[in-house]
Amino acid sequence: MTDIVIAGIGQTEVGEHWELSLRELAYRAIKAATIDGGGLKPQALFVGNMLALNLSNQAHLGALLADYAGLPGIEAVSVEAAGASGAAALRQGYLAIASGMVDVALVVGVEKFTDKVGPDVEAAVATAADSDYEAMQGLTATAQAAIIMRRYMYEYSVPANGFAGFAITAHANGAGNPYAMFRKAIKPEAYARAEMVSEPVNMFDAAPNADGAAALLLTRRDLLPKSYPHPLVRIAGLGAATDTLALHDRHDPLWFQSAQLSTERALKKAGIQLDQLNFFEYHDVFSIYAALALEAAGFAERGQGWSLAANGAISLKGRIPCATLGGLKARGFPGGASGVYQAVEAALQLRGSAGANQIVGARYGLIQSLGGPASTAVSAILEKVD
Amino acid sequence: MTTPNPQNSSTLLRPNKPVGIVGYGAYVPRYRLPAREVARIWTGGKGGLPIKEKAVPGLDEDVITMSIEAARNAMARAQIDPVELRAVWVGSESHPYAVKPTSTLVAEAIGAVPNTQAADWEFACKAGTEALVAAMGLVGSGMAHYAMAVGMDTAQGKPGDALEYTAGAGGAAYIVGPAEESLAIINASYSYVTDTPDFWRREYQKYPEHGMRFTGEPAYFKHITEAATALMQAAGTSPADYKWCVLHQPNTKFPQRVAAQLGFSPEQIAPGLLVPVIGNTYAGAAMIGLTGVLDIAQPGDRILMVSFGSGAGSDAFDILVTDKLPERRGRATTTQAYIARRTEIDYATYVRFRGKLQMK
Amino acid sequence: MEIARHWRLKQQRYGLVGEVCPHCDYKIFPPRDVCPNCGDEAKTQYAFSGKGEVFSFTTIYEAPTGYDANAPYTVAIVKLDEGPMVTAQLTDLGDQPIEIGMPVEMVTRKMRNDGDERGIIVYGYKFRPFGFVPQR
């Protein structure tokens, strides 16, 4: 089969876009990706979104965005898998092209958090958990991460501030990303002093909910125009997996089984080994999820994921650079758009366009997007094609 | 006029078939508001205090949740199958709903549905003992083998009012069954009621009104005294025949004074006098007082319990402890254990817990 | 208003009624149609004792709509004595510190209003420290 390539990428700055609506955000990313892709026309649109129904009272995003983006008549549908919605939409776009039914697919991840504020946002995010048995107890996404993190610290005797490296690395990298919400490095003291959100998750252990949209134009390599202007990035492997929706239903809540399965599946498809990866865009919506993702992928032993952050292995010059453009933590967490942002960022790295944050000689990048506490995981391996 | 049948003219309420208590359970919420906190806010700390402290329910508690816990304790002591209950009756003046029964939810929670009577009772502070008398009738008539009566309240007191010092939270559940299965036999009861407007709460009003000193002599003292005296007269007993006496307890002084007037000693009322440490639990007051006695009573002990409800009336009970009590009481949390489980709160926390903060 | 939904779940909410798998005897809560242990169909009701221990916990200060009036509150994953784990609020804590491994027992409490104060009151399970009850 021919290679499926990421022909165009686009993103908006992540932040509080009070003046922009969901459709306007999405259009900005679509427009940027379309221009970047050199004029390829999509036949299908896959929208990754998590919360429009709750936060914008808007369903039917496929038709809305196809229409608003000036793509009348094309096939369009939205894909929802909580925080992994964007990556799941990428997966659908990939499958559409791989099936031969679609030549050019547009994937857009969009999230508009700021049309509601405070408790309504917490309630909306909590809809990704088990409504009858988790959200009913007043559980929030942050509390769920805190429950995992506390148990993890207890079982593996993680010192206080043991997770500091995740936020410090992310913020250092965010400084080099013009699209990031936070572009300022933080000091270890700032982490140590940070206010608790839900013990032991502090302000720097949780990524900020924010507005944003990112888009990808996918096609087959043989359909690219001769004048295609960028170094080529292909999707070498993609894997998706699920785990129990409710955290309490897992035999082992400290193990992200879906992250492991999706990584394995993506590696197998790409036909490469873990140690061939040059960087990892993980889903660091909470520091503990980054640690568990490192363990699930096989970069660290169980209970040791946090130490990769503590010893610098995840920094740009480390063994496995992570969150290379700030991750969810510093770039911001635009909900269901996150996975598409990760793909855009990985493509920038592989094109050699990551500026000050460039991983020199990067060939393979792993992106992984999680829905809830890895109830869904979608992993993709992007490759720079010579 | 025909001559009254002597049997019919007896003023005692006594079933044909002997009945008793097969299980009992108390509940007191964890939080305590010291009376001096109320005084600090409203009188600058001046004046005598009617009790030491009162029990305050947590943010997630109400008469339904509290009744469920007391009912579970009663079930644990009775060790009967909940499907054998033919009545689940809850007396309170703080039912969470204006319309929708407390009792169906309690019955559902303890597994007593669907083959049961369920109803909410209201008679100010004697709603619970009313239900208890009715349960005696239901079981004593043979209509039911077991019936549950609960008296529970989260009493309301207007901020700054005398009642705010004492309006507490708590109560108890009783399972009435055949005398031969009982940990205490209820020999008889007697009810004395008149129309006496000492205390009331109109529809849609948040807090009750009361007649201040009028709540004393013509109301509390009159009805308790008449009920206790009539019961003892009919039963041919005197205070000396009772090891323990439990009285409705709106504050510490009233039950002490009426006990003395009736001829009961401070020792006889001590284990059932809980108001100083939990406050006036209204429909739960006499009922939970009795649990304090049952937690320590011995087989053969005789107990007099007299409730009082404003409006007004008293139910008096003549109770005899059997040899089944010592083993059964250990199956659930004692009333004193609930009282000892105690977290003191200040007036501000109390205001929040009791929904007295204007939120909109 | 979600009255049918709350009504449907009352046995789980009030009594921790789950299931025991008729094929492998695995205890299941919340109930589900397929046994997570053996994969066979499960539907035999089983009432849990309500005793368990704290697996992990945290405190929520920024609560979702419907829960904000009770914040801050503590949520835990409780490992039930019979095996399964359940997410639940801890209550009646007073000033008592919480620890992983702490024994707890189920109580029935108010969870929230269905909608606003005009809606039904939703009751359900929470857990509280176990231990003030005299041991036999």
Image (tube, coloured by chain):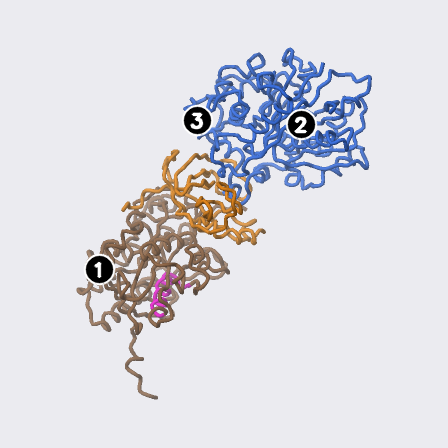
Place of residue B121 in the rendered image (x, y in percent of width and height, measured from the top left): 42, 63
Q: Which mark is residue A340?
A: 2
User: Which of the image's four quarters has the N terminus of chain B?
Assistant: bottom left
Task: Please state which amino acid type lies under the numbered disc 1.
Answer: Asp
Q: Which residues are magenta?
A: B121-137
The local secondary structure at tag 3 comes to helix
Badge 2: residue crowd in 10 Å (few <14, some 14–19, many ≥20): many
**Residue positioned most to the front:** C23
Task: Say which colour chain A has.
Answer: blue
| Res B282 seen here | yes
Looking at the rendering, which quadrant does residue B248 occupy?
A: bottom left
Task: Please state which amino acid type lies under the numbered disc 3.
Answer: Met
Looking at the rendering, which quadrant does residue A150 occupy?
A: top left
As measured in the structure, the alpha-carbon distance from the residue carrying label 1 to the one carrying label 3 is 53 Å
The stretch drawn in magenta includes residue B249:
no
Please give the residue where the numbered disc 3 appears in the rendered image.
A153
Is B203 positioned to the left or the right of A263 in the image?
left
- Same-subunit check for callouts 2 and 1: no
The stretch drawn in magenta includes residue B126:
yes
Please give the residue where the numbered disc 1 appears in the rendered image.
B323
Q: Which mark is residue A137?
A: none
Q: Which chain is brown?
A: B
| Res B162 seen here | no
Task: Say which colour chain C has.
Answer: orange
Numbered circles on residues, count: 3
Please tell me which residue is depicted at 30% across the width and 61% down the height of the picture. Answer: B22
Please tell me which residue is depicted at 33% across the width and 52% down the height of the picture. Answer: B279
Please tell me which residue is depicted at 28% across the width and 49% down the height of the picture. Answer: B336
